[in-house]
Image (cartoon, helix red, strand yellow):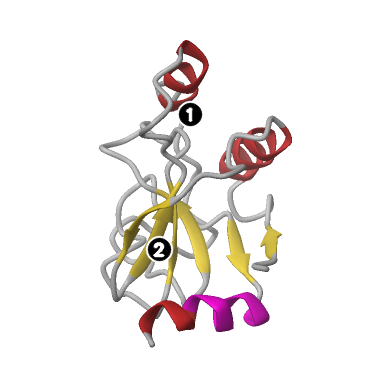
Amino acid sequence: DIDIDVHPEWAPLGAARYLDLVRKGHYNNIGLNRVNGDIVQFGEDWKDRTSKSVSIRHKSIKDDPKPPGQVANKLSLKRGQMSYAGAGPNTRSSSIFFTVKPNPYLGREPWEVPFAEVLPPGMDVVDKFYG
């Protein structure tokens, strides 16, 4: 199991969107679509092309402001933090990643504000992906 601690105080819009999708079962049986040395990404149901799946993917939310004391291009995500993948400002929808290690390049974009974190026992599961 991978336990996640959601932090609405970090990113209220992102946290609310994630919790809404969890309640709707969007992430049930969703595979991982990217696993590399920096991130694990999931949230896109590439097999399901029904109108429900497409409407979820194409419903974007606004970016959350950067946390107090942080400015764009200065925030770097820490190991286990979760954020949305995006294609530009205000494009967050359902694709989420969490960091496998601290990454100075992730967290710089306006949409890459952490909204949750994987709790340490869950990161032990993630570490098994890498042998």
Q: Which secondary structure is most common in the magenta stretch?
A: helix
Q: In this view, does 123 lie to the left or right of 33?
A: right
Q: Quadrant of residue 105?
A: bottom left
Going from N to C along the chain, the mark reached first, 2 or 1, is 2
Residue 35 visible: yes
Residue depicted at x 48% and y 22%? 53
Amino acid marked by disc 1: Ile
Q: Is residue 31 left or right of residue 33?
A: right
Amino acid marked by disc 2: Val
90 in the magenta segment: no
Q: Residue 103 carries which label?
A: none
Distance from the alpha carbon under mark 2 to that under mark 1: 21 Å
Q: Position of residue 42 (x, y in %)?
A: 44, 50
Residue depicted at x 69% and y 66%? 3
Q: Position of residue 90 (x, y in %)?
A: 38, 31
The residue tagged 2 is: 40
Task: Give the magenta range.
Answer: 120-126
Between label 2 and label 1, give the one nearer the viewer: 2
- Of 103 and 110, nearer the camera is 103
